[in-house]
Image: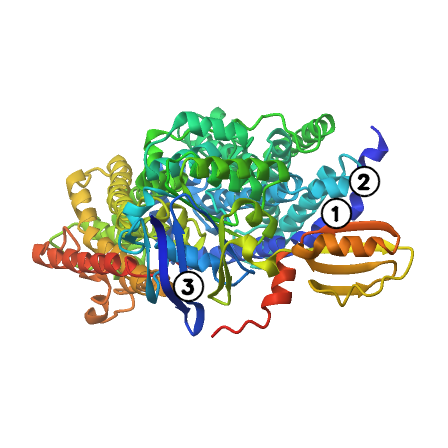
Amino acid sequence: MNKNLFKGTFDLIKLLAKRNILSISIWLVSIVSITVVVLGAFTGLYSSEEEMFAMAETMRNPAMTAMVGPSEGLDNYHVGAQMSHQMLLFTGIAIAVMAILIVTKNTRADEEDGLIEMIRSLPVGRLSVSLAINKLMSTVFILLFIVVAISMYLTGLENITLEGSILYGAALGMIGIFFASLTLVFAQLTENSRGTIAYSFAFLMLAYFIRAIGDVSNEMLALISPLGLILRTHPFVLDNWWPILVMFVASVLLFVLALYLNSIRDLGSGFIPSKPGKKTASKFLRRPIGLYLRLQRTSIIAWFITMFLLGVSYGSIFGDLEQFILSNEMIQQMVSQDSNFTLNEQFMTVLMLVMSMMATIPAVIFVLKIRSEEKKKRIENILSKSVSRNELLFSNLIISLVLGFLMLITSALGLYSASSAVMDDPILLSTIIKASIVYYPAMLIMIGFALFLNGIFERATPLVWLYIVYSFLVSYLGDLLQIPEAIMKTTPFGNIPNYPVEEVNVLNLVLMVLVASLLIVIGFITYNKRDIKE
Amino acid sequence: MKILESKSIVKNFGKVRALDGVNLEIKKGEVYGFIGPNGAGKTTTIRILLGILKADEGSASIFGMDVWSDAVEIHKKVAYVPGEVNLWPNLTGGEVIDLFTSLRGKINVEKRDDLIRRFNLDPTKKCRTYSKGNRQKVALIAAFASDAELFILDEPTSGLDPLMEQEFHKCIDEAKKAGKSILLSSHILSEVEKLCDKVSIIKDGKIIESGVLKEMKHLTVTNIYAETKSKVTGVNKLKGVHIFEAKDDGYSLQVDNEVLPDIIKKISDFDVIKIESYPPTLEELFMKHYENVEVD
C-alpha cells in the first residue's frame, strides 16, 4: 500500500491525544475506580458460607441471567466470581460507549465540521486520521487493561488471582478496541455524526439483547454477540482466553474494512445516504402538543424502556427474596417489620418508593420542556403565532401528567413480569399496580412545584431537582438512618402510604392532589404575567 | 386607518431602562422602517408588540387590540420573522414551515410551494443542517405564505445572499401591493431607503426622529472618494460638505445629495483620475449625526 496514505499519522496522534486527554482521563479514572470500589464492596457483602450461597441462589434465575450474563461460578460465588458475573458486562458496555463517543467525535463529527478538510489540505495522508484514532484508542485501552489488571491484583483479596486479573483487564480493553474499530467503520458508512452514533449504539443494544436471549436459551446465539463472547472468558472462574483472541481478530478485520472504505470514498460523503426528511408536516405536528411530543419522542421511548427494565431488574430479585433479605442487614433495616404481611410485600413497598421517584424524573423533565425551549429561544416561535400561553403550558402539562402516570404503570408491569416469573406464589398484578399508583399524587406535587417555580421565579426552577434529590435521600435512607417521622413527612413521597402494608388514606391523597392543583394554578397565572426571557 | 400604534412604551430590565417612551404609528398599506444601531431597543420594542414582553408603562395596540391581553387574536393576522431564527434541530424545514403557518391559520399549499421554490430552499433537510440564511428563509417562507395583514420583520436579511435579498424585496413589494402593512427593522440604510415609505430612528430606547426618509436631509448624504492630478482647493468650505479629508493619493468627502452635482462639477476642475461614490452606512451616519443627541 502507498506509504503516503499514512503520512503525518504520528503528529495527528499527538494532536488527538492533546484534544482528548481530559475526557479520556475522566473515563479511565471512573472505570478503574468503579471496578476497585465495587470489588471492595463485594468483599464485605457476606460473612459466612451460608450467606454466600444465599446470595448465589438469588442470582440463579433466568431474569438475572438475561440482565447480567451467564453464571459459571455460582457454586463457589466468591468475590472474583461475583465480579466477572455482575460487573464485567456493565463495565464493558460503559467502555463501548466511551469508544463510540470518542471515535465519532474525532472522525465523522470533525469531518462534518470541516476540521478534517483543514488537516487533509496539509501534507497528511488520506488514511492518516483513521490510523491515528485507531492507534490512540488502542493505546488507551491497552493502558486501561494494564491499570485494571494491576489494581485488581494489588487488592490482594482471596480468589483475585493474577491470571484472573489480567484476563478481566484484557476483556475490558478488548471490548474497547472492538467498538473503536466498529465505530470507525460506521464513521465511513454514514454521512453525519448522528448517524455514526445511532448505528453504533444500535449495534451495541442489539449485541446486548442477542446476548440476553442467547444466555437464557441458546449458547451459540450468545456467541454471535461480541458482549456474549467476551463474557465467556469467565475471569477468576474458568479463565478462558480464546474469546480475547477471537475479538482481536474481529477488531483487526473491522479496522481493515474501515481503512478500505475510507480509501474509496470522498471526503464528506458516506455509503449510507442520509435519507431526506419529510417535506411537509403531518396533521399531528400542527398544534403545540404534537410538536412537544414529537420533539421528545426518542426521550419518551427511552424512558419507557428504562422504567420497564428498572421494574424487571427489581422484580427479578423476588425469587429468593427471603434468603436475600436475611443475608443483608442493610435491607433488613429498610424493610419495616410487620408480620401480617410477607417479606415480599414489605420489600415491594420499598421498591415502589424508589420506582415512583425514578418515574417522577421524566415527568418533571417533560413539563419543564417549556423552560428548556425558552432557554433555547424557541418559545417565541410559538408565542408569536396564534397560540396562548395557557395552551402552550397546558400542552406540556398534559404530556407530563399522562406520561408520568404511564411511567408508574410501566415500572409496575416490569416488576410484575419479572417477579411473577421467579416467584412460587406471585404477588397479584392488581396489588402491584395499586401500590404503584398511590404515588401519583406525590408525582403531581413535584410537577406542580416545577410549574410553580417556572412561573413565579423562573431562575429558581432547578430547585425542583434539589427537592427530588432531597426526597430521594430522606425516603430511601430514612429507615436505615432512623430519620424522625416528621422529617420524612417533609417530602411528598413520605406522605404516601406503603400499600399494601399500610392502609390507603383517601383523604390524605385528595389533599395532596389539591396542593398540586394549587401549585399548578399559580404556575399558570404567574406564567401569563411574566416576560419570556431573551 | 391605524394598523399599529404604540404610545410612550417604557421597559426596564432591572435598573437598565431599555425603552424610554417609544411612539410608533403604522397606517394600513405602509412599509415602515425601524432603524437604529445594535442595542438601541429595536428588538425589545418588537417583542413588546408581540406580547412576549410586557411593557412597564405606556400602551400599544395592533388592529385596535391590546398587544398584551389580545395577543392570540392579533397573531392570527400577524407574521413575524426574528433576526436570529432558532429552530428545532430534528425537524425538517418543511415541517417547521407547516407548523408555523398552521399555528396561525390554514396552510396555503400553493403559496407555500411557490415561495419554497423562489427562495430555493430544500424543505426535506433537518434544521440542524441549515445555515443562518437557510433558517431565515424558513421563517420568511412561513411568514409570506400566510395571509397576514401585518408583517413584523426584525432584520430579516442579515443572513441572506444578494440573490435571495432581491427575492425578499420582491415579496415586500407584493405584500405592499396587496395592501398589507410592514414593520421592517433594519440597520442597512440602503434597504430601508429602497423599501420603506416612512422611518423611525431609535437610539438608546428613544425615538429620535420619524418621518419620510427623503425629507431627512442628514440621512441623504453620499461618500465620495476622488483622485486628481492637481491639488483640490476650496471645496471643504462649500455648503453641504460634511467631511473633507486629504488622503495619500486623493480625497474623501461626505456631501449632501442636494449639492452633489455642484460638488462633482467643482472637483472635475482639478483633473479627475478616478472618482468613486458610495452610500454611507448607518453606523457612519449615527456616529456623525446622532452621537450628541441627548436622550431627554
Q: Amino acid at mark 3?
A: Val
C-alpha span from label 3 to label 1 = 59 Å
- The residue wearing badge 2 is A124
Helix, strand or loop for disc 2: loop
* Closer to us: B108 or B133: B108
Q: Nearer the viewer, residue A464 or A359?
A: A464
Q: Chain of mark 3?
A: B
Q: Is residue B61 rendered to the left or right of residue A236?
A: left
Relative side of A58 to A11, left or right: left
Type of amino acid under label 2? Val
- Count of marks, rendered view: 3
Question: Which of the colour schemes (rainbow, by chain, secondary structure, one colour) is used?
Answer: rainbow
Circle 1 residue: A13
Does residue A494 sit above or below A19 in this rendering? Answer: below
Locate residue B107, reporting x and y percent: 36, 31
Q: Residue at x 65, y 44 (%)?
A: A106
Whether residue B7 is visible: yes
Q: Amino acid at mark 1?
A: Ile
| Front in this rendered view, residue B15 or A445 | B15
Q: Chain of mark 2?
A: A
Q: Secondary structure at mark 1?
A: helix
Whether residue A438 is situated above or below residue B233 in the rendered picture: above
Q: Are marks 3 and 1 on the same chain?
A: no
Q: Nearer the viewer, residue B72 or A262?
A: B72
Instruction: Please check whether the numbered discs 3 and 2 fall on a single chain.
Output: no
Q: Nearer the N terminus, badge 1 or badge 2? A: 1
The mark closer to the camera, 3 or 2, is 3
Q: Which mark is residue B22?
A: 3
Q: Residue at x 48, y 62 (%)?
A: B41
Image coordinates of residue A229 in percent, x first then y, are 54, 33
